[in-house]
Structure formats: C-alpha cells, structure tokens
Amino acid sequence: MYAYKEIITVDNLQQLTLSKPLNLPIGKKVEVLVIAEDDGESLDDIRGFIKQQDITESMINEAIEWARK
C-alpha cells in the first residue's frame, strides 16, 4: 500500500495541486480522502441547516440504520 500526506490550501474546488508528483504509475486508481479543519461551525448551525432542508428525525435515523448494515 502506498500512502501520501500533504497539507495544502484549496485554490480550485475541482483540482488539488500537490507540491511533488506521486510515486505511482500513470493510470493507477487511487482512493482520495479529504479531511478539512473544523471551521468553527456549531452544533446549532448544523441543526439549523438540517431544519432548512426539511430533514426529519426519522429520516436521520433511517440513514443511520442504513449505514450500519
């Protein structure tokens, strides 16, 4: 398994530019995991967003159950 970690600033929301080339052959399929720092969003902000989207408690519970399968 090959692993690479680099902290970058996002300038383009559709393209990530690394400081150096990856040590992989062209055409190699890779899995990309993006983890962003917390921007200070509070739980109340998240609840407000969910409420604006008309997402119900039962919908959330159903999604959790589905994800656990």
Image (cartoon, rainbow, N blue to C red):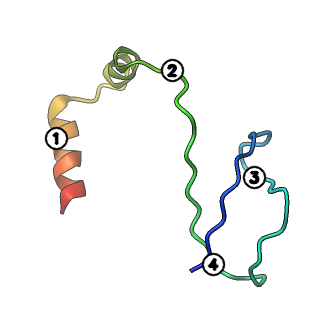
Whole-angstrom CA distance, mark 2 to mark 3, is 23 Å
Tag in front: 4 or 1: 4
Whole-angstrom CA distance, mark 1 to mark 2, is 25 Å
| Residue 8 occupies quadrant | top right
Disc 3: CA contacts within 10 A as few (<14), some (14-19) or many (>=20): few
Q: Is residue 16 left or right of residue 69?
A: right
| Residue 27 occupies quadrant | bottom right
Question: Which kind of residue does numbered mark 3 sit on?
Answer: Leu
Question: Which kind of residue does numbered mark 4 sit on?
Answer: Lys
Q: Is residue 31 left or right of residue 68?
A: right
Task: Identify the residue at image location x=56%, y=80%.
Answer: 1
Element on which disc 1 rests: helix
Which residue is labeled 2 in the image? 40
Element on which disc 2 rests: loop
Marking on residue 16? 3
Element on which disc 3 rests: loop
Whole-angstrom CA distance, mark 4 to mark 3, is 16 Å
Tag in front: 4 or 2: 2
Mark before the other along the chain sequence, 1 or 2: 2
- Does residue 34 sit above or below 23 in this rendering? above
Q: Is residue 18 left or right of residue 31?
A: right
Mark before the other along the chain sequence, 4 or 3: 3
Marking on residue 61? 1
Whole-angstrom CA distance, mark 4 to mark 2, is 34 Å
| Residue 23 occupies quadrant | bottom right
Task: Identify the residue at image location x=55%, y=57%.
Answer: 33
Which residue is labeled 4 in the image? 29
Question: Which kind of residue does numbered mark 1 sit on?
Answer: Asn
